[in-house]
């Protein structure tokens, strides 16, 4: 339980009625005011569009300090995890709350590897999709359908069933995603290989073909692993909140994760890195940057500077700093240090960070600014960028879903509203309208 820190007296000036509201102190971050008595004592709801000032839940998974540019997974700074850990270890950390011992990590790795295949009937699902169907539509549908294949372990109040689900979805989401990619290309599906690690297997399923051998490029695998770590969780964002809201109804976890995938598909959420590349291509050359930024500043123009600014961070996104450095290394090792889009991105960043218009508004590069460039360098097409995000974020979604379901105080999510529609009125027969 959170610690009670202070009490606030609220007085309704119209009625003179007063009530006492308590605040709670987190382990780190701002205090949270318990407004539950407002409706009972005063008949009031709070109004907070976009939930800008509302804590929707209590959680121990991830913490963000947007002003200081801090991101912690279970208390561990993202910089340390990016430098020293692996995605599989981070997934274990998010799900179980602690870093694993060597034995526990090996067991978890083995479980994920051995569950990476999907039922053959699921593969036939892809034949029902149009060849050019967006891969996010495909994986959202296939993940939801998994409940029809694993109904023997769907008791959400059974801790062992929850663990089985966690291992299954993290193991199978790369396979499901790769199948969508192969369907898009019209190529044969490649089965997972148990002698490869998580990201090596992902690359093999994406890029291998049956007619020739495929060797995983270590630089690609390392870059992917880093990106998966950085995208694994991000507190109560739109897709995570969607997973929690759907899961609060008691629905099966595959349905809840499918809902999260659908929410992530939105261009304001998981599709932002794709929009960054489109923006860079629109700018074209370094010579056009000033003209483009002028359009961004023009209130009459709808042009947006994609990849800058964040709903939470009012400082540098700590993930963007890590990705920027990784982008340099990846392109250099791949012999693409002269990548025109990357050079354009660097110059755009340099100019924008010196421009008072953007500096005063605290518009700093975010994680999406560079991630799309790395994906492109690896060979992953733009349509799959959000899918890569979903693969990573599945670990965080699972951690939050498990945390919520295991909470004895869990309640179904039911936001209220500020109603501004018609008051009660009588039905008018059609001949009198």
Image (cartoon, helix red, strand yellow):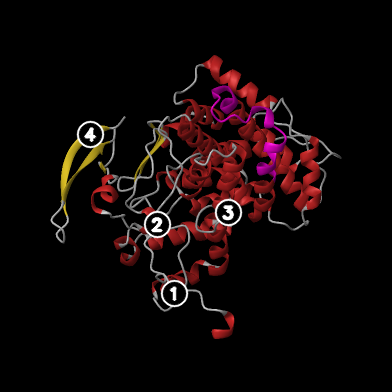
Image location of residue 292, percent across then percent down: 47, 72
**Quadrant of the rendered structure where residue 202 is?**
top right
- Looking at the rendered structure, the secondary structure element under dot 3 is loop
Of the numbered discs 2 and 4, the one sitting upstream in the chain is 4
Residue 25 lies in the magenta stretch: no
Residue at 58% over, 84% down: 431
Mark 4, residue position: 4
Q: Return the mark for residue 406.
A: none
Q: Return the mark for residue 265.
A: 3
The mark lying in front, picked from 3 and 4, is 4
- Mark 4 surroundings: few (<14), some (14-19) or many (≥20) residues within 10 A: some
- Looking at the rendered structure, the secondary structure element under dot 4 is strand
Residue 331 in view here:
no
- Mark 2 surroundings: few (<14), some (14-19) or many (≥20) residues within 10 A: few
Q: Which stretch is magenta?
A: 142-163
Image location of residue 101, percent across then percent down: 50, 16
Image location of residue 346, percent across then percent down: 47, 56
Mark 4 near mark 1, Cβ–Cβ under 8 Å? no
- Horizontal relation, residue 36 to residue 407: left or right: left
Of the numbered discs 3 and 4, the one sitting upstream in the chain is 4
Residue 160 lies in the magenta stretch: yes
- Looking at the rendered structure, the secondary structure element under dot 1 is helix
Mark 2, residue position: 50
Mark 1, residue position: 295
> Which residue is at the far bottom?
432
Of the numbered discs 1 and 3, the one sitting upstream in the chain is 3
Residue 353 to residue 218: above or below: below
């Amino acid at each position: 339980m959170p610690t009670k820190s202070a009490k606030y007296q609220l007085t309704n000036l119209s009625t003179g009625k007063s009530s006492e509201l308590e605040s709670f102190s987190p382990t780190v971050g701002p205090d949270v005011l318990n407004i539950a008595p407002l409706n009972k004592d005063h008949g009031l709801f709070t109004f907070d569009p976009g939930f800008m000032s509302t804590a929707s839940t209590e959680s121990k998974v991830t913490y963000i300090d947007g002003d200081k540019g801090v991101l912690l997974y279970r208390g561990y700074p993202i910089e340390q995890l990016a430098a020293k850990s692996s995605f599989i270890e981070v997934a274990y950390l998010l799900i179980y709350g602690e870093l694993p011992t060597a034995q526990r990590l090996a067991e978890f790795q083995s479980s994920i590897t051995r569950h990476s295949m999907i039922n053959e009937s699921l593969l036939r699902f892809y034949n029902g999709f149009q060849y050019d169907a967006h891969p996010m539509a495909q994986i959202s549908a296939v993940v939801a359908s998994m409940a029809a294949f694993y109904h023997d372990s769907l008791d959400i109040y059974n801790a062992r069933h929850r663990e089985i689900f966690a291992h299954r979805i993290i193991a199978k989401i790369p396979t499901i995603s790769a199948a969508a990619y192969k369907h898009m290309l019209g190529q044969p599906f490649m089965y997972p290989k148990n002698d490869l690690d998580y990201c090596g297997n992902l690359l093999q399923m994406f890029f291998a073909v049956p007619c020739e051998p495929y060797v995983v490029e270590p630089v690609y695998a390392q870059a992917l692993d880093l990106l998966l770590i950085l995208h694994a969780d991000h507190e109560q964002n739109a897709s995570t909140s969607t997973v929690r809201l759907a899961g609060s109804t008691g629905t099966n976890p595959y349905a809840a994760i499918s809902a999260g995938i659908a929410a992530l598909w939105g261009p304001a959420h998981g599709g932002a890195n794709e929009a960054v590349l489109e923006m860079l291509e629109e700018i074209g050359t370094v010579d056009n940057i000033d003209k483009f930024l002028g359009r961004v500043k023009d209130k009459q123009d709808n042009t947006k500077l994609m990849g800058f600014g964040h709903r939470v961070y009012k400082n540098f996104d700590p993930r963007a700093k890590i990705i920027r450095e990784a982008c340099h290394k990846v392109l250099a090792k791949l012999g693409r240090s002269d990548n025109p889009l990357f050079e354009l991105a660097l110059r755009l960043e340099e100019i924008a960070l010196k421009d008072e218009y953007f500096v005063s508004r605290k518009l700093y590069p975010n994680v999406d600014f560079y991630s799309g460039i790395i994906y492109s360098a690896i060979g992953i097409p733009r349509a799959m960028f959000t899918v890569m995000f979903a693969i990573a974020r599945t670990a965080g979604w699972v951690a939050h879903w498990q945390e919520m379901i295991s909470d004895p105080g869990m309640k179904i999510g039911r936001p209220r509203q500020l109603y501004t529609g018609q008051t009660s009125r009588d039905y008018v027969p059609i001949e009198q309208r």
